[in-house]
Image (tube, rainbow, N blue to C red):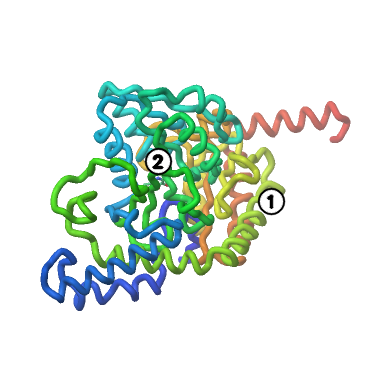
Amino acid sequence: MKVVYADNNATTMVAPEVVEAMLPYFTEYYGNPSSMHTFGGQVAKKMDVARQQVAEIIGADPTEVVFSSCGTESDNAAIWGILRANPRKRHIVTTRVEHSAVYNLGKYLAQSGYHVTELGVDSDGMLNLDELSDTIREDTAIVSIMYANNETGVIFPIEQIGQIVKSKGSILHTDAVQAVGKIPLNLSKSTIDLLTLSGHKLHAPKGVGALFIRKGITFTPFIVGGHQEKNRRGGTENVPSIIGLGKACELAKSYMDDEWVGIKQLRDTLEEEILKKAPDARVNGHKTQRLPNTTNLSFEFVEGEAILLLLNEKGICASSGSACTSGSLEPSHVLRAMGVPFTAVHGSVRLSLSRYNTREDVQYIIEHLPPIIRRLREISPYGREMKMKEQAAKVSAGIQ
Ligand code: PLP
């Protein structure tokens, strides 16, 4: 069956060059990088190269990069690492639109006696920076605000946020899982203290990530064990995946300019054509401050799951922000925080592209998605009601 993969914010294909780079680390260079012998030592040296490659894509120093098992671990490590290093500070600031890796940790911390402030967003998914400034207190240990939203692609003005956080004497962590490899970053000139990234969002394997910890930040390890990662994360490193992450970062950096212009053009065509062909559709999220690969569309009066099922029949892979996504019983907390009407939240679909998507893929989606929406509206009670209203409006306007 034909497959058009448009769910790259969920995960990406591992780049063939990445697989090739990883393979020797299973059967040839399998030594433990912490071993004293040369066989292990050579693996440690290769890991240094990967650390350099990761550092380069975010403009950091290699000593500031700590490898982890995923984005979720890096988010947890950042927040717990700062809270534990500053036990007298019990306040955390975050937002209502974070990925569950931070969002649910915030809920957990609130239940555990920490004070957690969740900042709201406007209908574009943007923060009110005055509110942020008013919220930070003397006992604010950490402000954790994502770089780019996984559902809508909305990009927060993270440097402006960082300036506010710095002026108030607190620490800024950003979950940049969706940003790294998609937009240029330079932490050497930045107010960000800690940054999370994850391999599987940028064509490296699943189960590997990294945490940037700025030099001079006092940090208590989240995973306590051996002396790996300069005592910042215990546990034998996942060497093949780390090598893959390094290679993926190198590739992403080399493709950064040209590739993303092309991806943005594809996304824009997709969005424009679907909006033209499907009535009562809307784009969720800021028009310009958005990742170049992401579109989050809402189709009023239809169920997101039904859209996904019919897209799936055509081999199109997408995501929905409606109920039951990823086993959740609740509709998207991100779209609800943006005040997207209930009827539109339920009919939301996220399409996210990558460098492996083609013009033909986009044409295929444009060909199949609007008829799916029409079909679902015809069978939905809301859809019938809408049609009656449309006809009534035409009659009263004298257009039969
Ligand atoms: N943060 C964001 C913004 C994400 O999109 C994701 C994954 O979807 C994560 C964190 C979690 O990353 P991982 O799947 O590597 O744990």
Q: What residue do we see at 68% from left, 46% from top?
A: 275
Disc 1 designates what residue? 272
Q: What residue do we see at 28% from left, 71% from top?
A: 46
Q: Position of residue 146 (x, y in %)?
A: 45, 41
- Front in this rendered view, residue 116 or 64: 64
Amino acid carrying label 2: it is: His
Q: What residue do we see at 50% from left, 28% from top?
A: 132
Q: Residues within 10 Å of mark 1 (few under 14, many from 20)?
A: few
- Front in this rendered view, residue 18 or 8: 18
Height in image: 45 above or below 214? below
- Front in this rendered view, residue 277 or 140: 140
Height in image: 26 above or below 379? below
Q: Which comes sooner in the sequence, label 1 or label 2? A: 2
Q: What residue do we see at 49% from left, 65% from top?
A: 253
Q: Seen in the image, is 63 located left or right of residue 319? A: left
Q: Quadrant of residue 249?
A: bottom left
Disc 2 designates what residue? 173
Q: Position of residue 391 (x, y in %)?
A: 76, 32
